[in-house]
Image (cartoon, grey):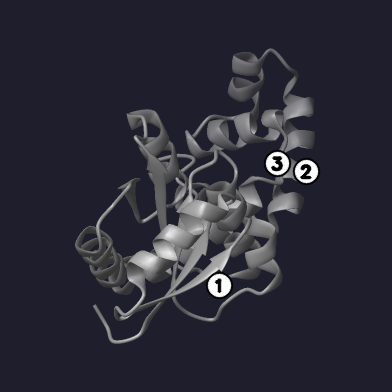
Amino acid sequence: MTNGTSLFLVDGDVRRRAAISHLLSGSDIHVEPFEDASELIARWPKAGLLLVHDDGRSIAALLAQMGRSGQWLPVIGFAQAPETRMVVRAVLDGAIDYIAWPFSREEIGHVVSEAEAKAETFGSAKLREALARSRVDRLTKREREVLAGVAGGLSNRMIGEKLSISPRTVEIHRANMLTKMGANHTSEAIRIAIEAALVE
């Protein structure tokens, strides 16, 4: 762990925020508590790690902000006795790690150290993924289906048959998709979809 790590804590529970801040007082980890994602977004940090209570909204909101701003910071999710599906969802959304609360100073110190090491390796890839996801998020459900068909190598006619729409309607959705994604051509849209992990 680097000396003087900044950890931005996002948690709506004032007692838990206080407990985590107290737990890490006197350590190499400097905690800045925030009540919710919007409060942190209003004062977005230049560097550090985010420790975010998984309330089903905050992690996704912060990752969406990173996609819009182009400034990625590692996110560690946490919850009390988290269900497996919560951890999986957070990681698929873009969290770099997850920890169960209550945790010890040693446990969170270890997770922070690992997150810092992973951030150096995955930082630019995660930023590209966040940016790509923000572009894909602009699409309607039908435009995403057309994008998936295009990425799968299907023609407009084949996409139309699969979605029970006309090839002309596919063309319209395809044009709208390119405009919304800011893509100049189909191959660029496919690259964005791959970076967003929409297709493999």
Q: Which residue bears the numbered disc 1? A: 71
**Label 3 neighbour load within 10 Å: few <14, some 14-19, many 20+:** some
Q: Give whichever of 12, 170 is nearer the camera.
A: 12
Q: Are marks 3 and 2 in contact (CB under 8 Å)?
A: no
Question: Are dots 1 and 3 in contact, CB under 8 Å?
Answer: no
CA separation, marks 3 and 2?
A: 8 Å
Amino acid of disc 2: Asn
- Measuring 31% from the left and 74% from the top, which residue is drawn there? 120
Disc 2 residue crowd, few under 14, some 14–19, many 20+, Cα 10 Å? some
Secondary structure under tag 2 reads helix
Q: Residue at x 32, y 80 (%)?
A: 26
Q: Amino acid at mark 3?
A: Leu
Residue that label 3 marks: 139
**Which residue corresponds to the image point at 42% horizontal and 34% vertical from the top-left?**
86
Q: Position of residue 87 (x, y in %)?
A: 37, 39
Asked if residue 164 shows in the view, the reply is yes
Q: Percent position (x, y) of residue 131?
A: 57, 60
What is the quadrant of residue 5 in the picture? Answer: bottom left
Horizontal and vertical percent position of residue 162: 59, 16
Callout 1: SS: loop
How far is the residue under mark 2 from the one under mark 1? 27 Å
| Residue denoted by label 2 | 176
Secondary structure, mark 3, is loop
